[in-house]
Image (cartoon, grey):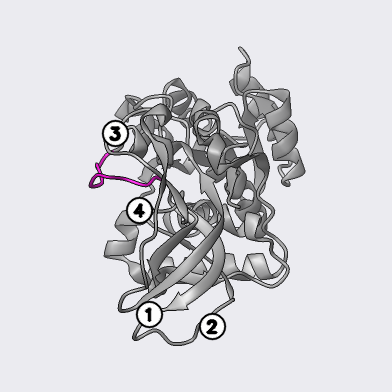
Amino acid sequence: MPKAIIGHAFGPPETYALHDFDPGPPGEGQLRVAIKAAGISYVDVLTARGEYQFKPPLPFIPGSEYAGVIEAIGPGVAGFAIGERVYGTGMGGILAEVGNFAAANVSRVPAGMSLETAAVFSVNYLTAWHALADRARARAGEVLLVLGAAGGTGFAAIEVGKHLGLKVIASASSADKRAVALAGGADAAVDSGAADWREAVKAANGGKPIDIVFDGVGGEATERAFRTLGYDGRHLVVGFPAGIPALKTNLALLKSASLVGVHVRHAGMERPDLLAEGRKRIAEMAESGLVRPAIAGRYAMADYVRAMDQAFSGKAAGRILMVMG
């Protein structure tokens, strides 16, 4: 019998347990996928704890992105074949050995891409593309400052930013994380905990102000990063694991800069055309070998508590991966 990590109440990883789980045959418009690898993110664990901005129904199987192999095809589905390698996303139901997923949300794994890479690329890279291309309207030659640069979306922002022709300055809290960011293509890396952080950012950009801030951190980092912006600067709010900051609006006025929200799920409801284009663009990047997400740790299903704890800690230099089987 296939297994899944299931919680009958929200809480820390210890609240969940490994249970037998078989979702049955795929329904109308669905594919049954044998999941081979799944990404675990901070938001996945936050949702499992019942602390995210919405609570899914119980019992709950955590996770939001996966890669695997098609086992069965439901009625009304065309264009797929049993045995094909695919990846996709969902709001739960992922940390399992098998699942039924809407075919509309499933894509083929690009040739040359491993299932492990496919399991941790789509959400982060689509977020980074939507943030930089759609919300910031980034132009080649501009300068991008990435906070939390070794995190999933931060690292994706580095690679997407370079693909868009931006100069990228990475900010991260440890030497290991800064090394990961530089290996991902960042032009410079600064210590996010340094007392002279603003001076270091300025020096990394030749004394000039920043055009775009990619902020997946929040907390105290937000205001000091906003202060690095120049005229027509855009500060992208992607997440705030360090806390929801309070930003003085006079800063936006004095700098003629903008605070820009990035909410992929909302964009999918309001502007599905933008996300469809974004998915196409990141797929093209993947097919060209331009997507190389950093993996910080690989865990078996039985070791899910440690995997989820590491993803939630914010200390990992790269993504956390669960490998099934």
Which labelled disc corresponds to residue 152?
none
Left or right, 76 with reference to 283: left
The percent position of residue 63, horizontal first and vertical second, equals: 43, 47
Magenta range: 53-62
Q: Mark 4 Cα within 10 Å, few/some/many (few <14, many 20+)?
A: some
Tell me the element at label 1: loop
Is residue 54 part of the magenta span, yes or no? Answer: yes
Residue tagged by mark 3? 10
- Tell me the distance, in whole angstroms, between the alpha carbons under discs 1 and 2: 11 Å
Disc with the residue nearer the chain's start (3 vs 1): 3
Residue under numbered circle 4? 91
Classify mark 3: helix, strand or loop: loop
Element at label 2: loop
Three-letter residue code for mark 1: Gly
Question: Which residue was labeled with disc 2?
Answer: 81
Depicted 140 relative to depicted 217: above or below = below
Q: Which residue is under mark 1? A: 74
What is the three-letter code of the residue carrying label 2? Ala
